[in-house]
Image: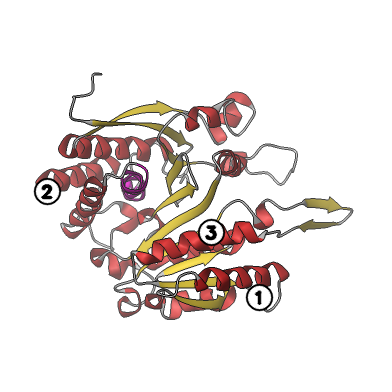
Amino acid sequence: MTTPANYRDYRVMTLPGDGIGPEIVAAARQVLDAAGRRHGYLLAYEEGVMGGCAIDAFGTPMEEGLIERCQKCDAVLLGAVGGPKWETTDPHQPRPEQALLGIRKGLRLFANLRPVKTFPALVHNSTLKPEVIDGVDMIVIRELTGGAYFGKRERVGDSAYDTMLYSEAEVDRLVEYAFGVAEGRRKLVHSIDKANVLESSRLWREVAIRVGARHPDIELRHMYVDNCAMQFIREPRQFDVIATENLFGDVLSDESAMLTGSIGMLPSASVGAEGVSLYEPIHGTAPDIAGKGLANPCATILSAAMMLDLSFGEREAARAVERAVETALDLGARTADIAAPGEQSLGTAEMTDAILAALAAG
């Protein structure tokens, strides 16, 4: 395909993955291409194999050379990986999740961004009272390359251990990034740790204080992770930007996702200091509905909007896609996971069509 002279062109590596992954990535591509026609850019796609499908095909969680292929693209769009078929506690057997850790390390992605924003049309879907979650707008920024997920681990006899290890440089990099995000928001950062118990958290807090001193215009608050988990339920509107380590961030970001009423609505981005970033919905592979055309594509479409913004600088197009999702919801479009009792639900294709129609209407 020849790119029109006045069009900006980008190359995207798509990793459909397992379960509903191929369906939701296909939906996101439709929306990305439609937005491109309206906003003057053109995307070229490559496709890679990663997750359980890679284990089936190659015996490893990702195809050989995938990271190098990703590095030659401008961004990576991931569907979802994993499922009961590949679950195992045998440390010698490959698992789909190893691919996630591997690609984050290979692409040097140090921060995971998970925006959590309630949609007015869905506020009654949450298990929390509408008055508690109405107006929630925060972002959880999770460190991705350190902590217990990458520390030394071993089984010794009938015991096992995992090491939570951080350097000052790793903490500084993550917290500094969080402060940069806060500059464009409400200028509030919560640094989440367990400094009353863990030495690694005491280091985290010390570094966070030093970073905060470099940004006197931004308020820094410290909170223990257990209290933060409670405050998400008690008063989530108090949060703006949250900075935390890998394991804590993994747990808190999934908890925060349910504030919106469905994990199927929330996007994420994993970014590095330079090079290629990765975008993915935070939900799983939903093998029970895979191939049935029932999956909610919204989180993947919103992840694609983050890609337009953060990787390509196509902010106008990104906002248009986000508005199209919200408009479709306001007009009553619902997949089964976000439909109230008695509401008609749409399949993946119909929900995507509703978003495309809203995008076309501007």
User: Residue drawn at (47%, 39%), measured in percent from left and top?
Assistant: 275
Q: Using residue 221 as the reference point, say whether residue 352 is left or right of it.
A: left
Where does label 2 land, which residue? 362
Where does label 1 land, which residue? 195
Q: Using residue 335 as the reference point, say whether residue 330 is left or right of it.
A: left
The answer to whether residue 170 is above or below residue 28 is below
What x and y, as percent, mark residue 30?
A: 26, 35
Q: Are marks 3 and 2 in contact (CB under 8 Å)?
A: no
Secondary structure at badge 3 equals helix
Where does label 3 land, which residue? 174
Residue furthest out toward the left: 361
Around disc 3, counting alpha carbons within 10 Å, would you say few (fewer than 14), some (14 to 19), or many (20 or more)?
Answer: many
Q: Is residue 59 magenta?
A: no
User: Residue drawn at (34%, 49%), measured in percent from left and top?
Assistant: 306
The prevailing secondary structure element of the residues shown in magenta is helix
Q: Are marks 1 and 3 in contact (CB under 8 Å)?
A: no
